Amino acid sequence: MQAVTDLGYEKPTPVQEQAIPLVLAGRDLMAGAQTGTGKTAAFALPILQRFAPQASTSTSPARHPVRALVLTPTRELAVQVYESFRDYGKHLPLRSTVVYGGVDMNAQIAELRRGVEVLLDTKLVSATCKTAELEGGVAIRTRTLVSTVPSSPHPLIEALALPKTKNGRLLVDRGLAVEGRNDIWALGDCAMVPDPNGGFAPPTAQHAIRQARVAAANIVAGIRGGLRSEYAFKGLGKMGALGHRCAVAELFGLQFSGFIAWWLWRTIYLMKLPGWGRRLKVASSWTLDLFLPTELVQLKVGRTERAPERERVASAA
């Protein structure tokens, strides 16, 4: 609490109010919020709170095993998250460090050997409920895995001389027209679309489909001189698969988790498939997967090198 007070925090943001109790309870969680809304504190503070009973002033690396692994898409974000952990936990005898490529690894390896509780910005190869395997064959024991990998706009957007946010998305109005233009529209994960409830619409399929309808109508209205529509969809909910028959979901304000959320997630995606024939095929396959073990198949489709012309002629002779 002292570190939070020193940083001038007075009350939690909406994402912090919802996420912190769930993280403290050890629940699986997927959260999305705009930049500057306190997402880092939403997972960093409860992680430090959970680690506080194991905090040790000992210098022995054995007293500081890696307990949490945070993945970020960029070095800059990794450093920001590391600095946040450092500031939030400055009154706790916990260690954290950041690891990334493109620099001399000796200092980073030495830091790891000293023992750290939080490791940032290194590549994850695989994970189980007890361990995380990093690139290079390094395995660490951890039960907490946080992923902060966002969606990003198409690289083509970067080359456009149009107003954008710092994460590269085009700025648009409620009618999906790019700011300052009446002949260019943008939607989906390429644009920062204002949300009717405040903030911006998330870059998910349910929003992109409805944005496309508004954009199409406004393009026609622009050509014919009619009235333009505004995007006013509030969203039906959020879902995310977490692994083996487990998921989290929020639909119409109701929250689900575990097998029920996983079943809802698959059912909704099944209904999005085009054609009843395809839906029946996929539904039959998914139903059989509930009772039959997974089949592992490996197809080696590597391209063989073409034999020189002389060798082919000799073989034909």
Image: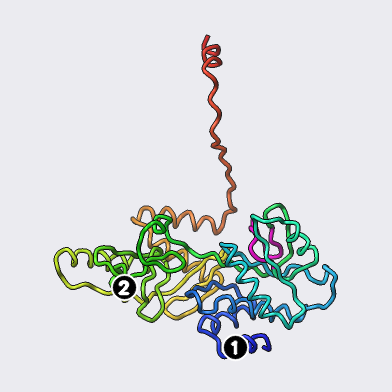
* Mark 1 surroundings within 10 Å by alpha-carbon count, few (fewer than 14), some (14 through 19), many (20 or more): few
Which residue appears at 70% of the width and 80% of the height?
89
The residue singled out by tag 2 in the image is 173
Give the image's coloring scheme: rainbow
**Whole-percent x and y of residue 124?**
64, 58
Question: For numbered disc 2, what is the local secondary structure?
Answer: loop
**Whole-percent x and y of residue 27?**
61, 76
Question: For numbered disc 1, what is the local secondary structure?
Answer: loop
Say whether residue 120 is magenta. yes
Q: Which residues are magenta?
A: 119-133
Left or right, 222 with respect to 193, comes to left
The quadrant of the rendering that contains the N terminus is bottom right
Instruction: Looking at the picture, tell me which residue is in the foreground, 139 or 121.
Output: 121
Which residue appears at 50% of the width and 83% of the height?
14
Say whether residue 263 is magenta. no
**Whole-percent x and y of residue 243?**
58, 63
Numbered disc in front, either 2 or 1: 1
Mark sitting earlier along the chain (2/1): 1
Q: How many marks?
A: 2
Task: Inspect the image, locate mark 2, and give the three-letter code of the amino acid beneath it.
Answer: Asp
Q: Can you tell which quarter of the image residue 19 is in?
A: bottom right
Q: Main secondary structure of the magenta part?
A: strand
Which residue appears at 64% of the width and 76% of the height?
26
The residue singled out by tag 1 in the image is 8
Instruction: Looking at the picture, tell me which residue is in the foreground, 43 or 293.
Output: 43
* Mark 2 surroundings within 10 Å by alpha-carbon count, few (fewer than 14), some (14 through 19), many (20 or more): some
Q: Can you tell which quarter of the image residue 44 is in?
A: bottom right
Which residue appears at 74% of the width and 67% of the height?
66
Q: From where the camera sits, is residue 205 visible?
A: no
Task: Inspect the image, locate mark 1, and give the three-letter code of the amino acid beneath it.
Answer: Gly
Instruction: Looking at the picture, tell me which residue is in the foreground, 64 or 111.
Output: 111
Whole-angstrom CA distance, mark 2 to mark 1, is 34 Å
